[in-house]
Amino acid sequence: MKNYALHQAEFNGFAPGAANLATYFRNWQARRAVRALEKLDDHLLRDMGVSRECIRTALRMPLDTNPALYLENLCHH
């Protein structure tokens, strides 16, 4: 997955510098956490105030966007 993130960064015109890699790595970790929410049942998601559609939308965000922060803003406002 790390190679995928690096490839996406290069493809999108980002120079592979330390700051960019750190951002992509944090966003990749957040993406894994958001993806884990998909495994929860609807009742738990509803208790958290998150819908499956919100999760899907967050996971479609580009790699330079933190999907966990996007999910928080999308579903709690």
Image: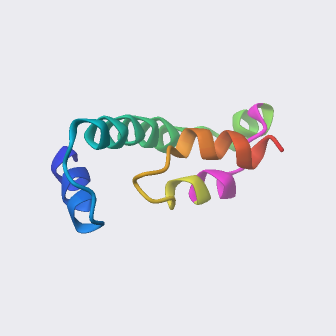
Of residues 14 and 65, the one drawn nearer to the viewer in this rendering: 14
Q: Which residue is rendered at x = 26% and y = 41% of the image?
A: 21
In the drawing, does residue 29 fall left or right of residue 73? left
What colour scheme governs how the chains and residues are painted in the rendered image of this protein? rainbow
Q: Up-down: is 5 above or below 50?
A: below
| Left-right relation of 66 to 53 | left
Could you tell me which residue is drawn at 59 percent across and 38 percent down? 40
Magenta segment boundaries in residue numbering:
48-56
- The percent coordinates of residue 9 (x first, y second) are 26, 57
| Residue 43 position by quadrant | top right
Outermost residue, left side:
3
Q: Is the residue 62 above or below the residue 27 in the image? A: below
Which residue corresponds to the image point at 34% horizontal and 43% vertical from the top-left?
A: 24
Query: Going 30% across and 43% down the picture, which residue do you hit?
Result: 20
Query: In the rendered view of the protein, which quadrant contains the C terminus?
Result: top right
Task: Give residue 7's position: percent from left, percent from top.
Answer: 19, 59
Left or right placement of residue 11 versus residue 37 in this view: left
Q: Position of residue 63 (x, y in %)?
A: 40, 54
